[in-house]
């Protein structure tokens, strides 16, 4: 595959499968989002591989392998062993190596999703690791999250506000939360999702298809 123009305006020195990061706090629904995206990408004819991060286990990777949604061999696990953001930002070599190995084993792969371990609102991805990244928050974490101006919320290419179905039960004004997130991000993309019912998943898949795979 030829070198391509990255979404950030630079020609990527690495060639091969595009790499998309998925970050966000513990319990925000990153793994559930991946489980919904797998069939969405399959329906679009996208060949996929996945890297998951956990501190000292392979729990998320095993969950996806057992799901029956994807060939288990296409799912790799990275144990961060420290702060989750270390292996996606300061020193992403473990994740780069895992993605490189998946590409070597599956040369048909067009897209590799890299799921960060659960982290805080300051979590961001190194662009040495990914071409494009999203940050997942959930309404149960509080509707004040967008007002906290965390780097994850502000700098990501796509903000995902998940678990919208919980808003009535946790006292969250969802339209206000969406408006405040839009204002904080200066109008950059936001998608509201309910992974339990697959709401918003098609919109995310289409954004990645357009912005990352240029299709």
Image (spheres, rainbow, N blue to C red):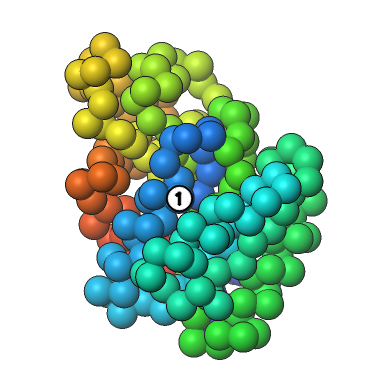
Residue 85 in sight from this viewpoint = yes
> Farthest front residue?
66
Quarter of the figure that contains the N terminus: bottom right
* Residue 83 vertical position relative to residue 73 in the rendered view, above or below: above
Q: Is residue 167 left or right of residue 6?
A: left
Q: Residue sitting at 55 percent across and 60 percent down? A: 61
Horizontal and vertical percent for residue 199? Answer: 21, 46
Number of residue marks:
1
Horizontal and vertical percent for residue 172? Answer: 27, 16
Q: Residues within 10 Å of mark 1 (few under 14, many from 20)?
A: many
Q: Residue sitting at 24 percent across and 57 percent down? A: 202
Residue 156 in sight from this viewpoint = no
Q: Quadrant of residue 103?
A: bottom right
Horizontal and vertical percent for residue 73? Answer: 55, 77
Q: Residue sitting at 45 percent across and 46 percent down? A: 30
- Residue that badge 1 annotates: 31
* Residue 88 vertical position relative to residue 114 in the rendered view, above or below: above
Quarter of the figure that contains the C terminus: bottom left
* Residue 74 vertical position relative to residue 96 in the rendered view, above or below: below
Q: Is residue 151 left or right of residue 45?
A: right
Q: Secondary structure at mark 1?
A: helix
Horizontal and vertical percent for residue 117? Answer: 61, 44
Q: Quadrant of residue 138?
A: top left
Q: Residue sitting at 26 percent across and 12 percent down? A: 171
């Amino acid at each position: 595959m030829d070198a391509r123009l990255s979404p950030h305006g630079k020609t990527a020195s690495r060639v091969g499968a595009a790499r998309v990061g998925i970050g966000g706090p513990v319990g925000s629904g990153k793994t559930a989002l991946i489980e919904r995206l797998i069939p969405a990408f399959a329906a679009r004819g996208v060949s996929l591989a996945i890297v998951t991060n956990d501190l000292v286990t392979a729990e998320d990777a095993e969950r996806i392998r057992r799901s029956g949604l994807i060939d288990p061999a296409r799912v790799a696990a990275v144990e961060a062993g420290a702060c989750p953001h270390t292996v996606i930002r300061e020193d992403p070599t473990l994740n780069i190596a895992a993605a490189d190995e998946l590409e070597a084993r599956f040369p048909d792969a067009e897209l590799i999703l890299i799921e960060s371990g659960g982290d805080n609102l300051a979590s961001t991805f190194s662009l040495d690791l990914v071409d494009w990244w999203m940050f997942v928050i959930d309404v149960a974490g509080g509707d004040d999250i967008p007002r906290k101006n965390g780097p994850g919320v502000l700098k990501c290419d796509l903000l995902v506000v998940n678990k919208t179905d919980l808003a009535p039960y946790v006292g969250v004004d969802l339209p206000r939360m969406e408006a405040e997130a839009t204002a904080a991000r200066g109008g950059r993309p936001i998608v509201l999702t309910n992974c339990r019912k697959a709401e918003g998943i098609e919109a995310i898949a289409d954004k990645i298809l357009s912005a990352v795979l240029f299709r």
